[in-house]
């Protein structure tokens, strides 16, 4: 297993501490024609693993103007099986091709035998899972030659065999592997609501020294079989007011950090996304001002 000191030697560029947007095909032309004031764009790695075609043609042009974050959804970091070597090799080629400022993946699993499940499924928080996840992260970081960020999940079930809180599980992963963490504030609110624990206490305990990026997104509401409130990490609506408030609260601990607006379903016209990005930039600017004023006192 790699030590944090050895991982520190990996290539590590940094996104600007501004708001970013997920890059969607319907917006390619508008972005290139207007060059909007976005801090960075983020793409899902699996959408660009082909060798050519329009997705690469547009991404190459957009990459020439903007910092880039690559976000994986298919490595199955939390899976019982070894990582898919073919998938990992394709990911490495993509990273070498675009040299993004950031690469991240989810604390989840999505494969079983030869089957790929179109979902990000939770892992039990126990010693066995911890060892396996750390081994997988070590392999990813060694293969890519860079430090990765690991995202906290949105969850809807909990495992009886879990014997540590999620925050402690993530903290120990970062300590053992030297990876960074991607703090998805919407996921925190979704999970804390679904499992009835305190959102503020979770964020207060989160190891902010490892946070390299924030994600913000919208959620959908439903009910579970008992009629209780159930939140879904749907990525199809604006960021909820409560998530904006939680984001501003955690910014007071972290300071300005690159912040992505996720909107992957029912994707709206680009100006709607820009409005969300401007909200994030205002929150980041407010925190910069707060810190500057405190420094002068």
Image: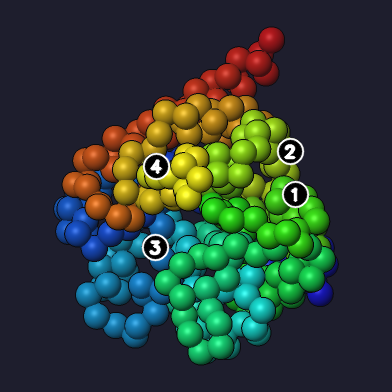
Q: Quadrant of the N terminus?
A: bottom right
Task: Check residue 43 in the rendering and tell me which mark sits there, or answer none.
Answer: 3
Q: Is 31 located above or below residue 86 in the figure?
A: above
Estimate the x, y position of residue 93 in percent, counting from the top left.
Answer: 48, 81
Q: Is 265 located above or below residue 90 in the figure?
A: above
Is residue 230 visible to the viewer in this orientation of the structure? no
CA neighbours of label 3 inside 10 A, class few (<14), some (14 to 19), many (20+): some
Cα separation between marks 1 and 4: 25 Å
CA neighbours of label 1 inside 10 A, class few (<14), some (14 to 19), many (20+): few
Element type where label 3 sits in the image:
strand
Do the CB atoms of the residues marked 1 and 2 lie less than 8 Å apart? yes
Element type where label 4 sits in the image:
strand
Q: Earlier in the sequence, mark 4 or mark 2?
A: 2
Tell me: 34 left or right of 293. left
Cα separation between marks 2 and 3: 29 Å
The residue pinned by badge 2 equals 205
Q: Earlier in the sequence, mark 1 or mark 2?
A: 1
Q: Is 283 located above or below residue 96 in the figure?
A: above
Front one among 141 and 207: 207
Tell me: 55 left or right of 43. left
Which mark's residue is nearer the viewer, 1 or 4? 4
The residue pinned by badge 1 equals 165
Is residue 50 visible to the viewer in this orientation of the structure? yes
């Amino acid at each position: 297993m790699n030590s944090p000191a050895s991982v520190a030697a990996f290539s590590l560029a940094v996104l600007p501490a501004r708001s970013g947007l997920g890059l969607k095909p319907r917006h390619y032309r508008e972005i290139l024609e207007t060059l909007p004031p976005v801090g960075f764009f983020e793409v899902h790695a699996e959408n660009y693993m082909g060798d050519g075609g329009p997705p690469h043609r547009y991404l190459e042009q957009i990459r020439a103007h903007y910092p880039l974050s690559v976000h994986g959804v298919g490595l199955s970091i939390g899976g019982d099986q070894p990582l898919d070597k073919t998938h990992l090799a394709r990911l490495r080629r993509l990273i070498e091709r675009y040299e993004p400022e950031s690469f991240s993946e989810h604390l989840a699993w999505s494969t079983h035998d030869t089957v790929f499940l179109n979902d990000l499924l939770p892992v039990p928080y126990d010693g066995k899972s911890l060892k396996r996840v750390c081994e997988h992260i070590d392999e990813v970081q060694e293969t890519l030659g860079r430090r990765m960020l690991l995202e906290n999940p949105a969850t809807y079930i909990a495992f009886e065999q879990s014997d540590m809180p999620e925050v402690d599980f993530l903290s120990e992963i970062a300590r053992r592997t030297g990876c960074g963490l991607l703090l998805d504030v919407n996921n925190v609110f979704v999970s804390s609501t679904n499992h009835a624990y305190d959102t503020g206490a979770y964020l207060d305990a989160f190891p902010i020294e490892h946070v390299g990026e924030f994600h913000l997104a919208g959620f959908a509401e439903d009910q579970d079989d008992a009629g209780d409130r159930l939140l879904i990490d749907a990525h199809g609506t604006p960021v909820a007011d409560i998530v904006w408030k939680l984001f501003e609260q955690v910014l007071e601990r972290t300071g300005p950090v690159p912040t992505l607006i996720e909107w992957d379903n029912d994707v709206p016209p680009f100006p709607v996304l820009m409005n969300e990005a401007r909200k994030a930039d205002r929150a980041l600017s407010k925190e910069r001002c707060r810190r500057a004023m405190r420094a002068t006192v």
